Image: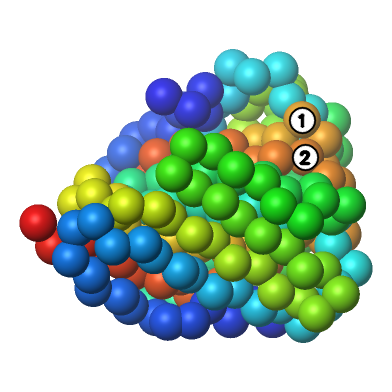
Amino acid sequence: KQEVTQIPAALSVPEGENLVLNCSFTDSAIYNLQWFRQDPGKGLTSLLLIQSSQREQTSGRLNASLDKSSGRSTLYIAASQPGDSATYLCAPLGDYKLSFGAGTTVTVRA
Amino acid sequence: ETGVTQTPRHLVMGMTNKKSLKCEQHLGHNAMYWYKQSAKKPLELMFVYSLEERVENNSVPSRFSPECPNSSHLFLHLHTLQPEDSALYLCASSPRSVSGELFFGEGSRLTVL
């Protein structure tokens, strides 16, 4: 069974700082890994999808890396803004299923 | 707007009621999913449908009954629920069930009294 751990559980930074969110998973037999954002009481918004053959994926201020062999992914958010405040979820996909971590709750202070 | 629409957004029901959650996707995807999100817990996969066939039933109690009449619609029928079933129920779809990117709806917030 895939176990997903996200560190830290919560993070509070002043506006403009760069964010580093870590995700580790126990089973490296994955097809891809998705990063999501969730605002309170809302659904999940897909941020980035990294295929298992890729090492990195970028979208605007977001950059995600994947080291499949060591079971790690990192999401970097550059020049954080208050609108980036949300919970960020990492989800490796294997055998039909996305397995989710508990998330990192980010607060960006104006 | 992700192309996945869930109704109702909020539902309050008693333990003896029968209700249904509905999910509709307009993305032409072949796979649809139900997830449960309880407070302070990671998302839990409940059911997966691929081309209208159920391919995953993740040890979910029989008081939850899924239905997928076609590749665009997914239902979750609810009956004799317990207060601990109160949660956010999220529907998702993907182009294919194995390696496709998932797109989620906004969720249905269920409260069982």
Give the numbered dot on residue A102.
none
Give the mark nearest the N terminus, 1 or 2.
Answer: 1
Q: Quadrant of the rendered structure where residue B92 is?
A: top right
- Disc 1, disc 2: CB below 8 Å? yes
The residue beneath circle 1 is: B95
**Disc 1 to disc 2, C-alpha distance:** 6 Å
Quadrant position of the N terminus of chain A in the picture? bottom right
Instruction: Residue type at mark 2: give it.
Output: Gly
Residue A44, visible in the rendered structure: no
Nearer-the-camera pick, A84 or B50 = A84
* Image location (x, y in percent) of residue A58: 60, 43
The colouring scheme, among rainbow, by chain, secondary structure or one colour, is: rainbow
* Image location (x, y in percent) of residue A67: 77, 69
Left-right relation of A26 to B92: right
Within 10 Å of disc 1 (Cα), the crowding (few <14, some 14-19, many 20+) is some
Give the numbered dot on residue B100.
2
Q: Quadrant of the rendered structure where residue A31 is?
A: bottom right
